[in-house]
Image (spheres, rainbow, N blue to C red):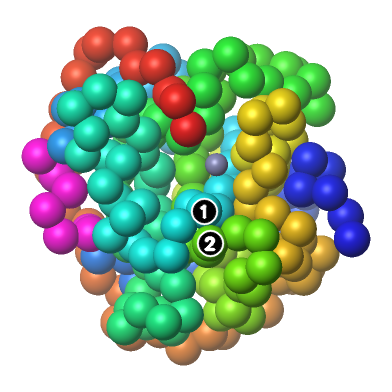
Amino acid sequence: MPSPKSYHFTLPKSKRPGEVSLNEPWYPGVQPYWPTCTTKRSVDPIMGITTVVIHATAGGSSAGAISVMKKPTDAASFHWLVPDEDEDQHGELVWACVPEALAAWHVRNAASHPDVNDGARRVNHWSLGIEVVNKQELDPFSPWQVEITARIVRHCWAKYPNLAHVVSHAKLDPDRRTDPGTLFDWERFKHLVLNGEADAIPVAVASAKPLSELPASEALGCCHT
Ligand SMILES: [Zn+2]
């Protein structure tokens, strides 16, 4: 079984898809927490995005995952949340949690890997973060969870011209993190991202995000995820 610390692949420009739709309503009630769980990006919010980081929550519910965004200190955050198989939204939608224009706090600032964006630190500024709800250890991921995570990545690939890396949290922070874990089928996920087969997954009509995305706190965030 491959180690999550090895999970990483690059996106060939020649295979970049056209628009890939996504049913991504806001998780209810998250907006008030953005000023205390995000940072203004240090790079251009479109051209500066090079990487998507794949996480798993190590908890069994979307509500539990969202609770980290609401902590008054040591908050964490991510752009999308993929529901677990026993939640009503499974098979229907992914939750949008933080505006893509803002840096979410999903990788600690000191973490880096020489293979990813030339070893740059402060990963949150030039990345997007996806959390998949999964207890870890012996909890299998559903096939849909892998498929829709691939679809989110393809949605991003279509949107961000310089997106080039898809990597696990474990590879970026191997001493502290193992997510998304050994049971996340990285080879199938990679195949779906590169070949677009997940684009055909039926989902409800895509809902547009509001155009007015809130400004972020200027304070420097310290990510503890
Ligand atoms: Zn993580």
Residue 81: x and y, percent? 40, 58
Query: Circle 1 is placed at which residue position?
Result: 58
Q: Main secondary structure of the magenta part?
A: loop
- Compared to residue 180, the image places residue 123 above or below, namely above
Q: Please, is residue 176 above or below residue 202 in the view? A: above
Label 1 environment density (alpha carbons within 10 Å; few <14, some 14–19, many ≥20): some
Q: Are marks 1 and 2 in contact (CB under 8 Å)?
A: yes
Judged left or right of residue 95, residue 108 is right
Residue, disc 2: 135
What quarter of the picture does the N terminus occupy?
bottom right
* Label 2 beta carbon within 8 A of ligand 1: no
Badge 2, how many Cα within 10 Å: few under 14, some, many 20+?
some
Q: Kindly identify the residue that appears in the image at 12 percent across and 53 percent down.
A: 29
Task: Tell me, for residue 109, which label it has, or none.
Answer: none
- Residue 105 is left or right of residue 171, and the answer is left
Residue depicted at 52% across the width and 63% down the height: 134
Q: Residue at x 31, y 30 (%)?
A: 75
Question: SS of the residue at dot 2?
Answer: loop
- Between residues 39 and 21, which one lies in front from this camera angle? 39
Image x and y of residue 200, in percent = 56, 84
Q: Residue at x 27, y 40 (%)?
A: 69
Amino acid of disc 1: Ala
Q: Secondary structure at mark 1?
A: loop
Can residue 51 be seen in this snapshot? yes
The outermost residue toward the right is: 1
| Between 137 and 201, the one nearer to me in the picture | 137
Apparent side of residue 84 relative to residue 76 in the rendered image (left or right)? right
Task: Give the extent of the magenta segment.
Answer: 26-32
